[in-house]
């Protein structure tokens, strides 16, 4: 039995008390962009309920073309207006450099990725970088509330990055 | 007061009973890729606990270079081995075409995105397409358990796509 099978069994319990469907557009008009880190329970740490906010996640919680694509669809087609960015302490992206990772992958597969790993050496600065990639994009129309935070995996608290 | 401020107040309650830190590598060695849709509470619907699984999300739950980047980091640096893909019923990505969206953005901003919207007309076929984009990538080493599902937003149930 794989872990996937165990999670499918959990889903039976979830569905037993599930009430749906809710409307498609997020009711709070918020989109969250966060790191994929297993310790970030985005619904829990923000107190989100089903149906409230889009949640976009990747390694680092960084902004690449794919997050701009998701945010453009979120705001233009589904009505969200605020953006919450979340990086976190003890992030794996702080533990290697882009060149190291790409060379490791090339060494093992023979193929060098044509993308950046988006590794970063400074947490707060990468939150600012991510905010700037959003505010610098012509494709994300609502930019009045684009705020960046660091989640502390020791305390569960969000700290805003100025 | 913005919605973001309200969520920050929720975070105070979350942190009050938070116990951390947990280890960085996901304890269940699973990575989930799911749509950003507000009705998909990934922790809830799979019964995930903090620290167990990476969660990667975007518009559609599709696989682009950025999801391959995240999965490569997840498996190569942080030890995950299984992948769970989740699309869902009533998805916004079924409601428009790529050409329509790109032309709308171009019409409003004057700039045509250099990325695809990744809109799709067939839910099951796009799950298969996403699985194939993973199994066709040289950068994702563990491919023994890459399984795709559709989440039903009316019932809360996952259905596996063969």
Image (cartoon, coloured by chain):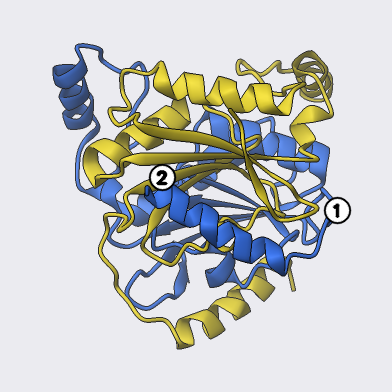
Chain colours: A blue, B yellow
Q: Residue at position x 34%, y 31% from top?
A: B144
Residue B117 seen from this side: no
Q: Single out the residue that lies furthest toward the bottom.
A: B16
Which residue is identified by label 1?
A23
Residue B122: % across, % down: 74, 23
Q: Considering only vertical position in the picture, is A131 above or below A40? A: above
Q: Residue at position x 50%, y 25% from top?
A: B131
Identify the chain of the residue marked 2, using the numbered disc in the image: B
Q: In the rendered view of the protein, which quadrant contains the C terminus of chain B?
A: top right
In the picture, residue A38 is in which quadrant? bottom left
Q: Residue at position x 85%, y 53% from top?
A: A23
As helix, strand or loop, the secondary structure at mark 2 comes to strand
Q: Considering only vertical position in the picture, is A46 above or below A119? A: below
For this view, does B156 lie left or right of residue A43? right
Residue B37: % across, % down: 69, 47
In the picture, residue B24 is in which quadrant? bottom left
* A80, B118: nearer the viewer: B118
Which residue is identified by label 2?
B31
In the picture, residue A74 is in which quadrant? top right
Q: Single out the residue that lies furthest toward the front.
A: A1
Q: Label 2, label 1: how many angstroms apart (C-alpha)?
A: 27 Å
């Amino acid at each position: 039995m794989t872990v996937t099978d165990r999670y499918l069994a959990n889903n039976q319990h979830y569905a037993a008390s599930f009430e749906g469907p809710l409307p498609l557009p997020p009711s709070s008009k918020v989109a969250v962009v966060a790191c994929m880190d297993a310790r970030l329970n985005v619904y829990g740490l923000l107190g989100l309920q089903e149906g409230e906010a889009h949640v976009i996640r990747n390694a680092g919680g960084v902004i690449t073309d794919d997050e701009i694509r998701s945010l453009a669809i979120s705001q233009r087609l589904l009505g969200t207006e605020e953006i919450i960015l979340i990086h976190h302490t003890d992030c794996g992206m702080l533990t290697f450099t882009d060149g190291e990772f790409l060379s490791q992958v090339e060494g093992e597969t023979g193929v060098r990725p044509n993308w950046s790993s988006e590794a970063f050496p400074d947490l707060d600065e990468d939150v600012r970088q991510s905010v700037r990639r959003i505010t610098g994009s012509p494709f994300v129309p609502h930019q009045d509330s684009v705020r960046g935070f660091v989640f502390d995996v020791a305390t569960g608290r969000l700290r805003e990055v100025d």
